Image (cartoon, rainbow, N blue to C red):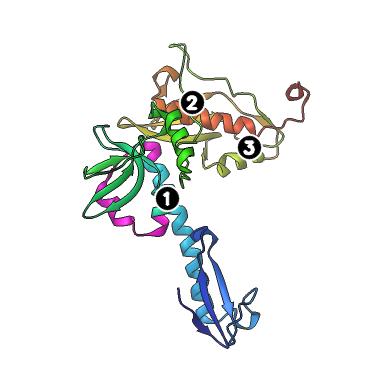
């Protein structure tokens, strides 16, 4: 972006290599020397105000792109190729999507997303290291728990020095093993003690989970239905001691879903939430010290 006159100075936005989230306002004097900060006397200049608004919008746009791409992945949604082509020129979208593992509807084409061109289609690097292109009308960004060759893909990604904007390959996954068909909850992560409810609530929110009716909630759309993984955290005033409850699953209308009946993504994301809440517990107790 070019320089814009602001009083006796010129200002511009520097996005840099770290992306829009690290965009900053630059200022230089008439001699062209870069200043460490924007002088106070032009802080209210219209040009400065407009560029500050632009940096905020860029950062917000980048976060929205990442959140949307992550939502596509968690839901393993079919994404129209035309959408990928349309957004690819945008650096924020490209940073969110590049190097995600995608598959075509039939599952015969799998690779790291590298390009989306209106004429040539979508370019991928397949597990053999070859560059392939697909013109499939839709592509899926599978949740990592659905990738049977996840470990191989992780090793290949390390060889390619792949750095995904959205944590897909290195997202924690939990695969269901033996579960009592009659069980109604998972208690593995229950009993994590917090000295104050507000600490547990704050951790849940900071991790991206909703807190509703005394529970931390993770919503997953899988196989045409919406399932909510829930962990009890407490519904009283925020200054009292509390501890996490068992992990359960329900449909949106509150109908219980047995752990054995939860889909692989709902299971993985529920266990991930429960484990993350457990990890933030107060360990300054005799029980946790053992």
Q: Magenta stretch containing residue 16, yes or no?
A: no
Alpha-carbon span between mark 1 and mark 2? 24 Å
- In the picture of the structure, the residue carrying the numbered disc 1 is 96
How far from the left and from the top, in percent, is residue 9?
57, 84
- Image height check: is 109 above or below 11? above
- In the picture of the structure, the residue carrying the numbered disc 3 is 200
Asked if residue 168 can be seen in this view, the reply is no
- Image height check: is 185 above or below 228? above
**In front: label 1 or label 2:** 1
Q: In the drawing, does residue 17 fall left or right of residue 236?
A: left
Asked if residue 228 can be seen in this view, the reply is yes
Front position in the image: 211 or 63: 63
- Image height check: is 99 above or below 274? below
Q: Give the range drawn in magenta.
A: 73-93
- In the picture of the structure, the residue carrying the numbered disc 2 is 174
Residue 107, quarter of picture: top left
What secondary structure is marked by label 3?
helix
How far from the left and from the top, in percent, is residue 83?
28, 51
What secondary structure is marked by label 2?
loop
**In front: label 1 or label 3:** 1
């Amino acid at each position: 972006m070019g320089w814009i006159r602001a009083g006796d100075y010129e200002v511009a936005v520097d996005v840099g290599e770290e992306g829009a989230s690290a965009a900053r306002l630059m200022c230089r004097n008439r001699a062209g020397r870069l200043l460490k900060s924007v002088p106070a006397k032009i802080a209210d200049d219209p040009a400065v105000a407009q560029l500050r608004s632009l940096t905020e919008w860029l950062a917000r746009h980048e976060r929205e792109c990442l959140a949307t791409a992550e939502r596509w992945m968690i839901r393993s949604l079919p994404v129209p190729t035309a959408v990928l082509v349309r957004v690819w020129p945008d650096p924020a979208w490209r940073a969110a999507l590049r190097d995600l593992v995608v598959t075509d509807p039939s599952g015969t084409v799998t690779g790291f997303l590298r390009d989306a061109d209106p004429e040539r289609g979508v370019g991928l690097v397949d597990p053999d290291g070859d560059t392939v292109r697909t013109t499939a009308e839709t592509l899926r960004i599978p949740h990592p728990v659905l990738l049977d060759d996840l470990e191989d893909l992780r090793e290949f990604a390390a060889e390619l020095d792949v750095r995904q904007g959205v944590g897909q390959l290195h997202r924690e996954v939990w695969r269901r093993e033996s579960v009592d068909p009659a069980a109604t909850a998972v208690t593995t992560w229950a009993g994590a003690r917090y000295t104050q409810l507000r600490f547990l609530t704050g951790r849940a929110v900071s991790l991206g989970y909703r807190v509703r009716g005394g529970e931390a909630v993770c919503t997953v759309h899988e196989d045409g239905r919406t399932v909510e993984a829930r962990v009890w955290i407490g519904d009283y005033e925020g200054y009292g001691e509390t501890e996490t409850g068992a992990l359960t699953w329900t449909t949106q209308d509150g109908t219980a879903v047995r752990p054995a009946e939860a889909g692989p993504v709902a299971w993985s994301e529920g266990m991930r939430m429960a484990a993350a809440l457990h990890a933030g517990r107060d360990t300054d107790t005799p029980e946790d010290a053992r």
